[in-house]
Amino acid sequence: MPGRRRRRLWGGLLLAVLPVLGTTPAATAETAPASAGPPSVGTAWDRPGPYEVEVDVEVVHTFYRPKDPGRSGERHPVVIWGNGTGAVPGIYGSLLRHWASHGFIVAAANTPTSDFALSMRAGIDVLERRNADPGSVYSGAVDLEHIGSAGHSQGGAAAVNAAVDARVDTAVPIQPGPLTDPDLTDVPLFYLAGQDDLTVRPALVKALYRDSDHLPAVYGEVRGAGHLSSIGDGGDFRAPTTAWLRFWLMGDENARAFFFGPGCGYCADDGLWSGWERNARALTIPGPGGV
C-alpha cells in the first residue's frame, strides 16, 4: 500500500472538537490503492453493481451493505455518510443502496445534524469491532484500510470534517455547507455543486475547492441540478461519485481516465457538467498508462 499522508500539526484545533477515533493510516493522493476486492463493473457506474443489498437500521447508524459480505473472500471498503440538515439516511436510501451494490459498506449516521461528523466517524469504530467479531456477518469482510467520507449539504461539510480522521482516505462533499475547513485535511476531495442550487450556491462550493490547493481536488458542477437533485438515487451525482469512490477505495483503474490525465473523460462531458476544474495537485495524478 502507498505511503501514508502526513497530518498537519494545527489540525489539533478541530481535533479538540472532533476527538481522534482511530489512527489507521490512509492512502496517498498520487495513486489509487491496490485492493483485492469487489469485481469490476467496467464503466457502468450509474447502474447497480453485482451485489444484492441488505440494510440494517440501528439506533445510531443505518448500514447499507452487500447481503453476504466477503462471499468470495473479498473485503469491502467503507463509506461513512452524513445527511443534510433535518434529513435521515432513508432520504438518500437509493444512492446508498447503489454504493452498497458496488461492494461498499456504507455507515450512514442517523443524525439530522451531522456537521461535526462525530456519529459519522463512530461508524468506523462500530465496523472495526464487528470486523473483529467472529460471530458477526461483517467478520473479516471489512476493508478498514480503505475508507471514504461523503455527505450532502450539512453532511457535505461533515464529509470534509470527517476527513480530519487519519483513517479516512478521500472525501466526497456533495453541495457542502460552509461550516468546514479543508485546510484541516489533505486527502483527495471531489467537490460537487449544482448549477441551479439556490441553497448552497456553486460559488460557495467553488470557494471551498479553491481553498483546497494543498491537496488534490476536483470540482464538478452538475448541469441543471438544484439542491435536492442528489437525494433519492443521486440523480446525475450517482455515476461520478461511484466512480470516484471506486477509484480511491478499490483501485478501479477504469475510473482513472475519467478524472485524471490530459484527456480525462469528465473534462469534456459538457452534457453532465456546467463547470469542471482540477487543481494543480490533481493535475499531477497520472492518467492511464502513467500519462
Image (cartoon, rainbow, N blue to C red):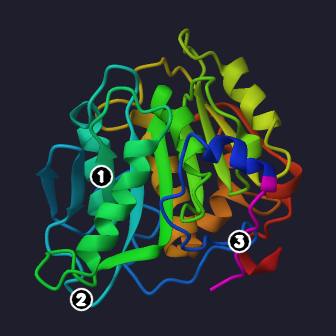
Q: Residue furthest right?
A: 280
Spatial separation of the CA atoms under disc 2 and disc 3: 27 Å
Apparent side of residue 199 relative to residue 141 in the rendered image (left or right)? right
Apparent side of residue 140 relative to residue 228 in the rendered image (left or right)? left
In magenta, the rendered stretch is 1-9
The kind of residue on which mark 2 rests is Ser
Marker disc for residue 28: 3
Q: Position of residue 197 (x, y in %)?
A: 55, 15
Q: Nearer the viewer, mark 1 or mark 3?
A: 3
Q: Position of residue 164 (x, y in %)?
A: 62, 52
Query: How busy is the neighbourhood of tag 1: few (under 14 within 10 Å), some, or many (20 plus)?
Result: many
Q: Nearer the viewer, mark 2 or mark 3?
A: 3
Say which residue label 1 marks: 98
Return the residue nearer the eye: 289 or 149: 149
Is label 2 in a helix, a strand or a loop?
loop
Return the residue nearer the eye: 22 or 150: 22
Is label 1 in a helix, a strand or a loop?
helix
Query: How busy is the neighbourhood of tag 3: few (under 14 within 10 Å), some, or many (20 plus)?
Result: many
Query: How busy is the neighbourhood of tag 2: few (under 14 within 10 Å), some, or many (20 plus)?
Result: few
